[in-house]
Every structure is written in structure tokens, then in C-alpha cells.
Image: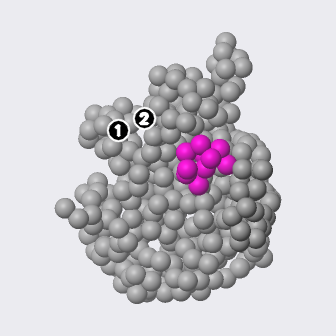
Amino acid sequence: MTYQGLIHTYGHFLDLPIHSRTVSLLEGRTPLIRADNLSRHLGGGFELFIKYEGLNPTGSFKDRGMTAAVSEALGRGATTVICASTGNTAASAAAYAARAGMKSIVLIPQGKVAAGKLAGAIAYGAQVIQIDGSFDDALTMVVEITNKHPICLVNSINPYRIEGQKTAAFEIVDELGSAPDWLCLPVGNAGNITSYWAGFKQYSGLKSALLPRMLGVQAAGAAPLVLGHAVENPETVATAIRIGKPARGEQAMQAAEESQGRIIAVSDERILEMQKLLAKLEGIWVEPASATGLAGLAAEIESGKRRPEALEGLKVEGQKVVAVCTGHGLKDSEIITRDMQKPSVVPPRLDALEEVILGN
Ligand SMILES: *Cc1c(COP(=O)(O)O)cnc(C)c1O
């Protein structure tokens, strides 16, 4: 049977109002890729899978929640959607609004959005507005304006976003036959970790599957959930998680606690290192934020080896680990090209090519 998108496939597990009118770009059904090379590099002895969410229609997992939020908005008769965004929500909202024949407005923090994401929002026809402030400022503003005017908010404060994003947990359980032992993922505004945990809990009741432990990972320069307080000026190369005051921070802490997991932070250096490692060892190129979950996994495995007697660190031997890679590398190609050596230039002659390749 042909695939008809997430609401068609999992709608009966999602709490969406009956007035919803499905708007879909056939999002979801993303590959769960075994990553044996990377698992071996991290010491081996465990099964590692990458949930490659960069293969959604607009290049990030945001499409899972957006199909639900825009379907509800359209069915209710809304004509305009708005969001604050570090980039991927903007592109996704703009695409689904376009498909629904609705107007989209996106607020982005000035100068802090990767070019590939901004280009997407513009291509899909959004009205893009830069805010001379942070993502957190932009989010406050969209909340205020939607309280005052009949414009539909599609940030992950919107409960239907969370409903839609639960489907990633359903897909993982359906594919593995049960939940993994650990799920690691980046945490920014904390909608995704909230959704996964809700999805696993709901599905485990239905399929009597066990629950995973959640490893939520923030960037060290934007780690309010690790520090225990809001961060005024969050800073990280992982722009998708450059958030100082997560809207669903409490739910993220609860997910970590209930699942006997944890929320940790890793440096930008480790994030970029993992981004390169994943591309070179597995052929999977993700944007920096999307490598954060794996960077956290690597850090935890290391600290578990260094101090095996301590209760810290992560013992993964014999376990099944799924790392969620939230967005595609093409979204932020600049992060790679800005430091690269220009490819060498060779005259169009075989001997010159041989010299470069074979070094004679
Ligand atoms: C939105 C986003 C995140 C963070 O997800 P939250 O739900 O805000 O925690 C991580 N990675 C990418 C690529 C994103 O677009």
C-alpha cells in the first residue's frame, strides 16, 4: 500500500480534534540505520542505530509535529500560522502552510539562523522577520501576538506539535519490535524529548514494550537544564539548540527522571567532532545540533570507562541504543565549508591527475 503520511498511519494514536483536516507531505517513515562502524569506534559491544530525521520533507523532524499542528489549524479555519524559530521550525511551518494554502510568518533571531534554513522559509513563501534579540525573545513575542490576534501559534507549545512528534517513538518501536535500552537526542526547547517520552509511554502500554532510558544532551553554552537556571545569552555552533529558556524544560527533566536517564551537556568541540565522525564513518551528514545526542553518548561511555567504579557514565555493553539525528547536514553547509581547504586545481591532463592521486 502506498504511504500516506503520519496522520494517516498513526492518527488513531494521536490526540487531534475531529475538526482537523489532514495536511501532509508524506513526512515520517525515516530510516533507522545501523551504525556498526561508529559503535565500534566508541568501544563496541553494543548495537547503535541512527534515526535519521534529516530525511523528512523539509530536512528535519519538525515536519512530524507540523503536519499535526497545521492540520488542526486548517480544520479550525485559521488562515495564518506564526512561529519563532532557530530555523528548522520556520522552514517546516512555511512548507506546511504553503501546502494548506495558508499564510506563514516566522520570527528568527537576527544573524543566528543557518543559511539553508532561512532559504527554505523564503522559498516556501513565509514572511520572515528578524528580531534583534534571541530565540527566547522571539518566542515571547509570538506568544503575545497570538494571544491578541487570530493567528495560530505552531511552536512546540502547541500541543498538536507534541502529538505529531510522538510518531517517531512509534516508528522506532515498530521497527525494532520493542523500545531500545537508551534513546539519546539533542535538547533545545525540549519539545522533542517530551514527545518521545510521551510516545514511548503510550506505545509501551499498547504493545507491552519496555521503556527506554532517555539521554538528553544540551550544548554547554546553552545548557539551562543542566545548570538549573535560564541562560541569558546562550551561545553554541549548534544553532538549532541555542535556547536559554526551554518552553518544555520541566517536562524534559521529568522525562529524564521517570526514565532513569539524564540530561547532560557537551562542548561545541565535541559536537563538531561527532558531526565529522558520523559523516566519515557512516556516510551520514547531519547538522551540528543533530550530532549532539551522539556526542553526549560518546562522552558518557568514556566517563563510564574512566571510572568504572563510579555510578556515573553509561554502561552500554549488550544494549541497544538509538541516537536521534534531528536534521540534515545540508541545512548548514557553511559550518563545513568555512574551515575547509579549497579543493586542489589540476589542469585537464591525465598526467597531472595521476600526480595528484598517485603522487608520482
Ligand atoms: C528543533 C531542533 C532541535 C531541538 O528540538 P527541541 O524540541 O527544541 O528540543 C534539535 N535539532 C534540530 C535539528 C532541530 O531542528
Q: Position of residue 298 (x, y in %)?
A: 64, 34
Residue lying at the far left of the rendered structure:
1
The quadrant of the picture occupied by the N terminus is: bottom left
Q: Quadrant of residue 303?
A: top right
Q: Specify how the rendered protein is coloured.
A: one colour
Q: Which residue is mark 2?
A: 180
Q: Is residue 205 above or below residue 141?
A: above
Q: Is residue 189 above or below residue 103?
A: above
Q: Residues within 10 Å of mark 1 (few under 14, many from 20)?
A: few
Instruction: Residue at 56%, 60% (x, y): give it.
Output: 328
For this view, does 254 lie left or right of residue 25?
right
The majority secondary structure of the magenta stretch comes to helix
Tag 2–tag 1 contact (CB < 8 Å): yes
Residue 116 appears in the figure: yes
Q: Amino acid at mark 1?
A: Leu
Q: Is residue 120 above or below residue 301?
A: below
For this view, does 160 lie left or right of residue 310?
left
Q: Which portion, as a residue range, is magenta?
A: 276-285
* CA gap, disc 2 and disc 1: 8 Å
Instruction: Residue at 61%, 50% (x, y): give it.
Output: 279
Mark on residue 152? none
Q: Nearer the viewer, residue 359 or 324?
A: 359
Residue 216 appears in the figure: no
Secondary structure beneath dot 2 equals loop
Q: Quadrant of residue 240?
A: bottom right
Q: Which residue is mark 1?
A: 176
